[in-house]
Amino acid sequence: MPDTDNNDHHRQFLRHFTTHEPAVRAFVRRLVPSRADADDILQEVSIVLWKKFGEFRSDGDFKAWAFGIARFKVLSWLRDRGRDRLVLDSDVVALIAEESQNVEPHLERQRIALETCFEKMRTEERDLLVRAYERNARIHEVALTSGRSVGGFYQWLHRMRKLLMDCITRALAEQPS
């Protein structure tokens, strides 16, 4: 394969993968018990997607293809951990995976609406919300750095979530289903 073809192939894969990675990550996350497990599985999924990208039809649905590979990787992960009491039976996971794929278009619209509404917020508000929801965030520390009491910060968080929810609801109502 000439170098330009290889670069084009690489660009096409990255375009598809970066577009659909949040949805694939969410799909895997719904099927396994922890974020760390989902991260490990997503790494394996991305490797398989890259290795098999040459078999992907250019007119195909990359997200559906990625979901299929992710589903098999999750089932494989479950099989390997079958003795763990925290792991769901593969039949249950298959049902959850099927339902997850069915609701994915709605979830995608919600993600887009959230991103749009989040971008409409003032930078200071966005930054503070991100800090409040970071892994291992301590609300009392975030509250103090924001200049609010802990109680006042929780009230502010409630207002921000309500504003975001109202914006998302309006955005979804304006979108065709």
Image (cartoon, rainbow, N blue to C red):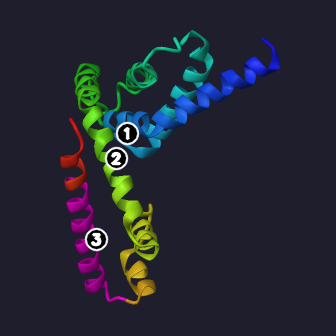
The CA distance from mark 3 to mark 2 is 17 Å
Q: Earlier in the sequence, mark 3 or mark 2?
A: 2
Q: Earlier in the sequence, mark 2 or mark 1?
A: 1
Disc 1 marks a residue whose amino acid type is Ala
**Residue designated by label 2:** 111
- Location of residue 6 (image quadrant): top right
Task: Check the picture and name the quadrant holding the N terminus.
Answer: top right
On screen, residue 118 above or below 100: below
- Identified at 78% across, 21% down, the residue is 4
Q: Name the side, left or right, on which 33 lies relative to 172.
A: right
**Residue designated by label 3:** 160
Question: Closer to the observer: label 2 or label 1?
Answer: 2
- Location of residue 176 (image quadrant): top left
- Identified at 24% across, 67% down, the residue is 163
Q: Is residue 43 visible?
A: no
**Residue designated by label 1:** 26
Q: Are marks 2 and 1 in contact (CB under 8 Å)?
A: yes
Spot occupied by residue 45 in the image (x, y as percentages of width and height):
51, 27
Spot occupied by residue 46 in the image (x, y as percentages of width and height):
55, 29
The CA distance from mark 2 to mark 1 is 11 Å
- Location of residue 86 (image quadrant): top left
On screen, residue 14 above or below 9: below
Q: Is residue 56 visible?
A: yes
Around disc 1, counting alpha carbons within 10 Å, would you say few (fewer than 14), some (14 to 19), or many (20 or more)?
A: some
Q: Earlier in the sequence, mark 1 or mark 3?
A: 1
Disc 3 marks a residue whose amino acid type is Met
Magenta segment includes 19:
no
The local secondary structure at tag 1 comes to helix
Task: Check the picture and name the quadrant holding the C terminus.
Answer: top left
Around disc 2, counting alpha carbons within 10 Å, would you say few (fewer than 14), some (14 to 19), or many (20 or more)?
A: some
Spot occupied by residue 93 in the image (x, y as percentages of width and height):
28, 25
Disc 2 marks a residue whose amino acid type is Arg
